[in-house]
Image (cartoon, rainbow, N blue to C red):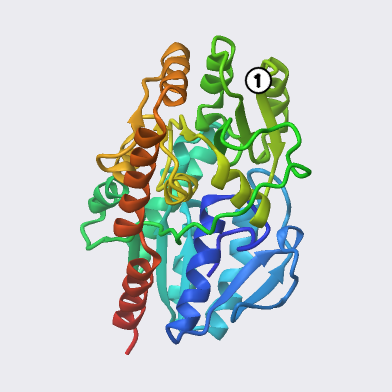
Amino acid sequence: MVGLRAPWGVEGGVEAAVAALAPRLVAAGHEVTVYCRTRYNPHGSSVREGVRLRDVETVYGRSSEAFVHTLLCAPRASLRHDVVHLHACGPALFSPIPRLLGRRVVVTLHGEDWQRAKWGATARTVLRAGAEVGGRSAHGLIAVSAGLAAWAGRFGRRVAHIPNGVAPHQPQAWDATVFPMLQPGRYHLFLGRLVPEKGLDLLVAAARSHHGDPIVITGGASHTDAWVSRLRGSAPPNVIFTGTRFDLEKRMLLTHARSFLLPSRTEGMPVALLEGMAAGLPALTSGIAPVREALGDTGTIVEEDPQAWARALAAVEGLSAGEWGRRGDACRARVLTSFGWERAVNAHDALYRALLP
């Protein structure tokens, strides 16, 4: 697998998806190698959960590192593996390389990355070209949402619609020494990378007129340091930035939040939302198609207006314990029924096997 920074210890929907998928593919009988960008991989070239991690350096920078890393890794992966699986639009630009070297190529489209606000005009053009090249040259094409699958239908071939999965939530007891600024059950949670397309400006604006529980924004910048600095500077005191949190601390925040917030304007299939729903949190979200696909008939769609978000926050805080529990249970049942990892693993396994002699 090529195209991500590293499967563990890094934020990002692609990284979270591969971290969950790769060990399960190993358990299904595959030998899996993930090529990592050295700076981001805390485990180095090693084996974790049966997955071989291989570090390869790159030229670090917002617009260059994924392309350079994939260019270096695609030939190496082709020499050692039967299937080369490229993740995301940018890396898909290099899908002809393993094909020319006689390997089977799979491309997963995780989102319409050329629509993300952090990219300039040139990067957007290249990302769109990557999706086009991958869509036409890969032997197997995967889309993580129904909308992406419909978009990819322009290539005149079968597209495998395989959404990201989610595992059952493991509750974590509250530890006041970890988050002394918070009270369990008395905060709303956003979880994800801090980038413009996540709609965090709406939450900050809503917080100015919302006088209830604080909004917790958990995540780090993704080549967006200047934008994040401005966002933090404009936030009122009832918006709390925790920085990036993993493992037990992330589970603790999910276990004890009052609601999960996702005001995104662009998504592929939002892993963080699936995690929030699996934790049994009522979801307040934007109305974009991938989010609606995740929610089904659960959750609350909020219009793109700060006052609407302030009203939605207040409404959740006004729920009775019974109604709050029913909404959270509906979200949990939805994702565990429709987005369990077993289905995704079986679909990947079948695709790989169909491509090989």
| Most foreground residue, 123 or 320 | 320
User: In x, y percent, where is residue 311?
Assistant: 43, 15
User: In x, y percent, where is residue 86?
Assistant: 48, 64
Residue 205 seen? yes
Classify 10 Å Cα crowding around label 1: few (below 14), some (14-19), many (20 and above): some
| Most foreground residue, 44 or 247 | 247
Per the image, label 1 sits on a secondary structure element best described as loop
| Most foreground residue, 330 or 3 | 330
Residue at point 68% right, 40% down?
A: 220
Type of the residue with mark 1: Asn
Q: Residue furthest bottom?
A: 357
Could you tell whether 181 is left or right of 143 in the image? right
User: In x, y percent, where is residue 349?
Assistant: 36, 77
Q: How many labels sit on residues?
A: 1
- Above or below, 341 relative to 276: below
The residue pinned by badge 1 equals 238
Q: Quadrant of the C terminus?
A: bottom left
| Most foreground residue, 182 or 274 | 182
- Above or below, 69 relative to 200: below
Residue at point 74% right, 42% down?
A: 176
Q: Residue furthest right?
A: 177
Residue at point 52% right, 84% down?
A: 31
User: In x, y percent, where is residue 232?
Assistant: 70, 23
Could you tell whether 167 is left or right of 36 in the image? left
Residue at point 59% right, 63% down?
A: 70
Residue 94 seen? no
Could you tell whether 244 is left or right of 329 in the image? right
Q: Quadrant of residue 217?
A: top right
Could you tell whether 22 is left or right of 233 in the image? left
